[in-house]
Amino acid sequence: MRDAFGREINYLRVSVTERCNLNCVYCGKEECAKRDSELTPGQIEKIVRAAAACGVTKVRLTGGEPLVRDDICEIARRIRGIPGIKTLSLTTNGVYLQKYAAALKAAGLDSVNVSLDSADGSTYRHLTGADVLHKVLDGIDAARAAGLSPIKLNAVLMKGVNDDGAGALIDLARTTPLDVRFIELMPFSDPGEDARLRVTGDALLRQFPFLTPTGQTEGTAVYYTAPGFSGRVGLISPVSKKFCAACNRIRLLSNGKIKPCIGYDTAYDVMPYLDNGERLAEAIAAIILKKPAGHDFEHTGPAHGLNKTGG
Ligand code: SAM
């Protein structure tokens, strides 16, 4: 369905947990919810079914870290069985991907985004608090072997922290048929400090002038390539080039609330309608109509970190 600003809302991001096995420096540091407050696979299925009745065709599982849930394959299988859901994807830090890739593919998962902020082991450990880069790389290999496609690697660069590794990440797109995407740091902790740390898409294009536009814009990413590259480089610029006018998404939080915009804390509880599919769909439609025109990161100050919102 269309929202109040005429945008077709067809994409639901489902945060299945706030829990995470990593502790990334720029992600939320708030107290995480306990496991027993998370939605069950059956509850998630009901909400996604109602969202599909409102026109949602695309679902992404995220978190927290979705692969800390040992029922993640059941969640995927239930969502994939809902009429109208055409694509199911996952955003993960990749640490447990080797364990789950084949089973998730069998459960109906189509594609995967893996967060990889550095290809250097010690920088990765500094950023995430864990010495597990090798596991992430094995997970990416397992995803390719399982036939998950496309596979996209997402990196958040920060000045003086990991921006010196941008070239090595871009090199992965040269040697491997993967998309490597750079997401601008969004202000979820300290807006002033985040602005100082942020590496914009334009700054990367100045630093790597061999990147040329492919003319492809997919979702939030604008793609670039270079001679001899097997994959592409994507730039996602939610701060320097706001794409709210084309936003097509809403977010289900792991506590059963739906958040219409990433930039605000506002979220609406749909749990009271869970046992009535029609009322649930009406509630979701009403939330879609409340979706604001755009985020206002620069003025509203920090919303919840992405561990709560579902990145
Ligand atoms: N645990 C999963 C993962 O690591 O992909 C899913 C959740 S994580 C919050 C999703 C994405 O949000 C990651 O790619 C992470 O880099 C990104 N993210 C977290 N905080 C961010 C911020 N302040 N600005 C931009 N991206 C952020």
Image (tube, rainbow, N blue to C red):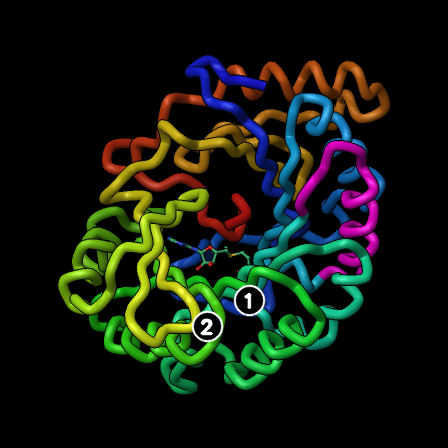
Residue 118 is at least partly visible in this image: yes
Residue 166 part of the magenta-drawn span: no
Q: Which mark is residue 93?
A: 1
- Residue type, numbered disc 2: Thr
Report the Cα–Cα distance between label 2 and label 1: 10 Å
Q: Residue furthest front?
A: 227
Residue at horizontal 31 percent and vertical 59 percent from the top: 224
Q: Specify few, some or many for label 2: CA neighbours under 10 Å numbering under 14, 14-19, or 20 or more.
A: many
Residue at horizontal 39 percent and vertical 86 percent from the top: 122
Q: Position of residue 185 (x, y in %)?
A: 32, 54
Q: Position of residue 9 (x, y in %)?
A: 54, 27
Among the 4 quarters of the image, the one containing residue 245: top left
From this view, report whether residue 273 is shown above or below residue 191.
above
- Residue type, numbered disc 1: Asn
Among the 4 quarters of the image, the one containing residue 19: bottom right
> Which residue in the protein does label 2 denote?
128
Q: Position of residue 271 (x, y in %)?
A: 74, 28
Element class at badge 1: loop
Residue at horizontal 25 percent and vertical 71 percent from the top: 163
Magenta part of the protein: which range?
69-87
- Is label 2 within 8 A of ligand 1 (CB to nearest ligand atom)? no
From this view, report whether residue 284 is shown above or below residue 310.
above
Residue 157 located left or right of residue 46? left
Q: Position of residue 296 (x, y in %)?
A: 30, 31
Q: Specify few, some or many for label 1: CA neighbours under 10 Å numbering under 14, 14-19, or 20 or more.
A: many
Residue 221 located left or right of residue 138? left
- Is label 1 within 8 A of ligand 1 (CB to nearest ligand atom)? yes
Single out the mark in the foreground, 2 or 1.
1
Task: Assign the N terminus to one quadrant of the image.
Answer: top right
In the image shown, does 85 or 249 lie closer to the viewer?
85
Residue 185 is at least partly visible in this image: no
